[in-house]
Image (cartoon, rainbow, N blue to C red):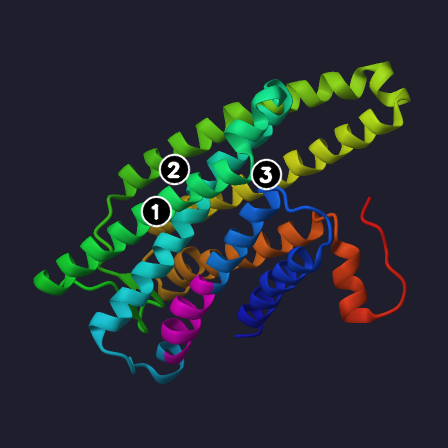
């Protein structure tokens, strides 16, 4: 429970940072806010409302239909973040290779439209899946015996390949971004120009953040759909399917805060005193 509260605090803290930032909102910050909201929804809907009470009591306090619906929402919010991760990688790629078209393809309006499309697609998916599960009475349920959710009916091999494909798309975009950043870093003119060097450092920081967040999704799916098959012991299933999933959202919020330009605002908010620049 302490970890759940810590993760929720991470995401609330990030939203506070970005909401109080007096600088113009960027598309990258907008996506971070959406990602933080999704993390909060997942942690409240799945873990606080279903997993924790059912683990402590040994039985569910919610109707199966509602429990299935809450878990379904959480899984789709989680997937929303992962689809968004690909767009973030492409965002960084376009910023470096096609900067003249950045506002058109990755500006605030473009970001809003892309995320709105993803959101609508997920809402439709949740609605259709919930109707199907209720009519067929095949609910997603958290098992207090296995300490993981059951009746997901997703092919582990298929999910691994989908995850790998998404990871490869992001990896290719990130690799190209890394090459460009390395060339900037090795360029003496960039290093001697203060403004250009600040821009290079900013892009390097955003690139590092993107890589770390992309890796979280791959690690989670590796444990859930591959490592989890190594043993049927309840503790191992809990580690692979529940603990890792929760930890991913904790680390996701933590990464966004640590790489944010306005970290000094959060430190001042929590500890008081003078601001500390994050560079």
Q: Nearer the viewer, mark 2 or mark 3?
A: 3
Q: Residue at x 25, y 72 (%)?
A: 66
Residue 236 x, y percent position in the rendering: 41, 59
Q: Is residue 207 visible?
A: yes
For disc 3, the marked residue is 210
Left or right placement of residue 232 versus residue 210 in this view: left
Gap between marks 2 and 3 measured at Cα: 16 Å
Q: Secondary structure at mark 1?
A: helix
For disc 2, the marked residue is 163
Q: Nearer the viewer, residue 28 or 245?
A: 28
Question: Quadrant of the rendered structure where residue 270 is?
Answer: bottom right
Local crowd size for mark 1, using a 10 Å CA cut-off: few (<14), some (14–19), many (≥20): some
Residue 226 x, y percent position in the rendering: 36, 44
Check residue 225 in the rendering and tell me which mark sits there, or answer none. 1
Q: Are marks 2 and 1 in contact (CB under 8 Å)?
A: yes
Q: Nearer the viewer, residue 232 or 166?
A: 166
Vertical relation: 132 (above or below) 70: above
């Amino acid at each position: 429970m302490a970890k759940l509260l810590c993760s929720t605090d991470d995401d609330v803290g990030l939203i506070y940072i970005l909401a109080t930032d007096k600088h113009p909102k960027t598309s990258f910050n907008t996506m971070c806010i959406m990602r933080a909201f999704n993390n909060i929804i997942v942690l409240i809907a799945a873990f606080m409302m279903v997993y924790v009470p059912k683990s402590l009591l040994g039985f569910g306090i919610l109707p199966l239909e509602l429990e299935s619906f809450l878990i379904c929402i959480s899984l789709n919010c989680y997937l929303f973040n992962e689809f968004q991760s690909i767009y973030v990688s492409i965002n960084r790629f376009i910023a470096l290779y096609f900067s003249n078209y950045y506002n058109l393809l990755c500006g605030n309006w473009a970001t809003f439209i892309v995320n709105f499309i993803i959101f609508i697609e997920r809402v439709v998916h949740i609605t259709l899946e919930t109707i199907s599960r209720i009519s067929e009475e095949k609910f997603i349920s958290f098992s207090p015996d296995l300490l993981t959710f059951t009746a997901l009916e997703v092919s582990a091999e298929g999910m691994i390949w989908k995850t790998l494909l998404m990871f490869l798309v992001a990896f290719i975009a990130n690799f190209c971004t890394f090459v460009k950043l390395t060339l900037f870093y090795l360029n003496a003119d960039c290093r001697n120009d203060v403004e250009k060097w600040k821009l290079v450092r900013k892009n390097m920081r955003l690139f590092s953040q993107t890589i770390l967040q992309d890796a979280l999704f791959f690690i989670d799916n590796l444990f859930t759909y591959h490592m989890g098959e190594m043993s049927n012991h309840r503790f191992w299933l809990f580690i692979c399917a529940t603990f890792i999933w929760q930890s991913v959202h904790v680390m996701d919020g933590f990464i966004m805060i640590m790489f944010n330009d306005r970290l000094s605002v959060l430190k001042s908010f929590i500890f008081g005193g003078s601001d500390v620049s994050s560079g």
